Image: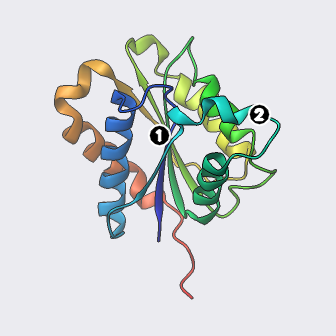
């Protein structure tokens, strides 16, 4: 089983990436997946996502999505939803590209009033692409960074039992 973390923050080395990687590791540990898992950091891909020519970096990231069994899809909360960077990347996927995969939505936010965005905005996008999306998604408040391990561990405990594992071959 492979786990991929997709980080849709336009800044490299972001808090979003820190939270997403911790969440993916917590879920992977609960599922018995071997580490390290893959990371698709979209921060360097922004200029290439809307370009008419194919980009090796974008194609490599799309390939990682195609190969993954479980995806942690993370973004900071911008204007009450996920980033345009994440949307532009996911728009490059063909219809049903996530069929047979489990996607775990995660939004990092500064204000708890945006907590529903993970369920109302990011979850439907992942479902539209064919993913199975366990509940709840992780709405992570920046104020929880000092408790990162406890928060992601508790969340992983709730979602890991719902993860669709790939069929044994």
Q: Is residue 78 left or right of residue 95?
A: left
- What crowding class fits label 1: few (fewer than 14 Cα within 10 Å), some (14-19), or many (20 or more)? some
Q: In the structure shown, which secondary structural element does the residue marked by tag 2 occupy? A: loop
Q: CA distance from mark 1 to mark 2?
A: 35 Å
Q: Nearer the viewer, residue 56 or 9?
A: 56
Residue, disc 2? 51
Residue, disc 1? 136
Instruction: State the image coordinates of residue 55 (x, y, percent, origin top left).
Output: 69, 46
In the rendered image, the vertical position of residue 90 relative to residue 158, given as above or below:
above
Residue drawn at (76%, 33%) of the image: 51
Q: In the structure shown, which secondary structural element does the residue marked by tag 1 occupy? A: loop
Q: Nearer the viewer, residue 45 or 149?
A: 45
- What crowding class fits label 2: few (fewer than 14 Cα within 10 Å), some (14-19), or many (20 or more)? few
Which corner quadrant of the image does residue 151 belong to? top left
Q: Nearer the viewer, residue 21 or 115?
A: 21
Which corner quadrant of the image does residue 17 belong to? top left
Q: Earlier in the sequence, mark 1 or mark 2?
A: 2
Q: Identify the image's colour scheme: rainbow, by chain, secondary structure or one colour.
A: rainbow
């Amino acid at each position: 089983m492979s786990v991929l973390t997709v980080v849709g923050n336009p800044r490299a080395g972001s808090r979003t990436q820190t939270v997403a990687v911790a969440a993916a590791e917590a879920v992977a540990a609960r599922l018995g997946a071997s580490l390290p898992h893959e990371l698709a950091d979209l921060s360097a891909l922004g200029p290439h996502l809307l370009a008419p020519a194919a980009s090796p970096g974008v194609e490599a990231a799309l390939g990682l999505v195609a190969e993954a069994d479980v995806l942690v899809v993370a973004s900071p909360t911008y204007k009450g939803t996920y980033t345009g960077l994440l949307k532009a990347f996911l728009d490059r996927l063909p219809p049903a590209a996530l069929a047979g995969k489990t996607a775990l939505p995660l939004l990092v936010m500064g204000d708890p009033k945006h907590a529903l965005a993970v369920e109302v905005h990011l979850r439907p996008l992942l479902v539209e692409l064919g993913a199975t999306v366990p509940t709840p998604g992780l709405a992570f408040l920046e104020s929880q960074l000092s408790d990162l391990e406890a928060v992601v561990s508790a969340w992983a405990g709730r979602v890991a039992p719902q993860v669709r594992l790939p069929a044994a071959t």
